[in-house]
Image (spheres, coloured by chain):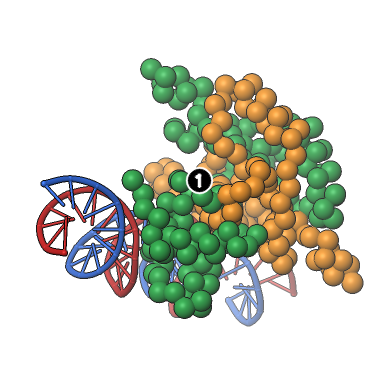
Chain colours: A orange, B green, C blue, D red
Amino acid sequence: MQRLTAQRQAILDLINASNRHWDADEVVRALVDAGASIGIATVYRGLAALETQGLIDSIQLADKKRYERADKAHHDHMICTSCGLIEEFSHDTIEELQLAAAAKKGFRLTGHQLVMFGYCSQCAKELKA
Amino acid sequence: MQRLTAQRQAILDLINASNRHWDADEVVRALVDAGASIGIATVYRGLAALETQGLIDSIQLADKKRYERADKAHHDHMICTSCGLIEEFSHDTIEELQLAAAAKKGFRLTGHQLVMFGYCSQCAKELKA
DNA sequence: GCGATAACGATAACGATTATCATTTCACCC
DNA sequence: GGGTGAAATGATAATCGTTATCGTTATCGC
């Protein structure tokens, strides 16, 4: 059972009060600037707890790199979070719709990345068993 | 002018010889196991060089997290690589096509993430100026 | 109030990546 | 074929975001 402590309430209020996308460091700074006393570890724990409770959402930005052969057409990736399998797929219509969506916002696209997470057919089977 | 040294050639051969998605650590281990003498820093530099030369491709898996309010419908993100602006968008057709693509591969999706990188309208304007 | 448990905060540890720097290799020129 | 300068190497230190540790503190149910 998770507790909604004063620190976590402060994190939640901060995030709910804006439309921004916060990282842990920005949260600590904002709270400390506002006079609160809170440590970075508490913020990490609080963010994780609030997320599992569904009170906030998160996105994961790209960081960890993996390299592959260049002699392939563009494609995106499905990753099995159970066994690590990386499956490739491509879909022309999705690509076109992305370009259109970017154009509508005035974005000039330089790249994109679509990653789908889930269970591959093998792992899905084993989960049922 | 970049050189295609013996070390970089070895990295390139390794990646070209397989269909896998390698991270730097796996590359060092594979090369050292194969009897080569190469350091981790060289592998990082080699991978980056080969990528800028277009000889290999890379994907960036999720890592760095950012948090946002939970009271929104599902959406994806466009990120301006120049000023850091994060713009949200959603597109039902893209969502549906993703689900269909996953189903075709036998994947049971638990989540996905579409991130588009580029220049926001403001930064795109300034680049031209 | 008391005991169990969850959360706290400071800080150490961690893993991936990048920077530093002295040394080595390569391409090119005379 | 030796000399020169740019680029690459490798060992290692440094960095960054994050997680683990651990002793202390707060909270909940009784």
Q: Chain of mark 1?
A: B
Q: Position of residue B7 (x, y in %)?
A: 41, 64
Up-down: is D10 above or below B51?
below
Judge the density around disc 1: few (<14), some (14-19), many (≥20) Cα neighbours within 10 Å.
Answer: few
Up-down: is B90 above or below B30?
above
Q: Position of residue A105 (x, y in %)?
A: 60, 23
Residue B39 falls left or right of residue A95: left
Q: Residue at x 80, y 66 (%)?
A: A123
Residue B23 falls left or right of residue B45: right
Give B100 or B36, whichever is nearer the viewer: B36
Give A53 or B58, whichever is nearer the viewer: B58
Residue B114 falls left or right of residue B44: right
Give B39 or A97, whichever is nearer the viewer: B39
Instruction: Quickly name the residue at label 1.
Output: B54
Q: Residue at x 70, y 29 (%)?
A: A96
Specify the quadrant that holds the C terminus of chain B: top left
Q: Position of residue A45 (x, y in %)?
A: 56, 60
Q: Residue at x 59, y 54 (%)?
A: A69
Q: Residue at x 53, y 68 (%)?
A: B26
Query: Tag count in the figure?
Result: 1
Can see residue B64?
A: no
Can see residue B26?
A: yes
The amino acid marked with disc number 1 is Gly
Task: Please tell me whether mark 1 sits on a helix, a strand or a loop.
Answer: loop
Q: Position of residue B120 (x, y in %)?
A: 51, 27
Residue D17 falls left or right of residue C21: right
Image quarter for residue B88?
A: top right
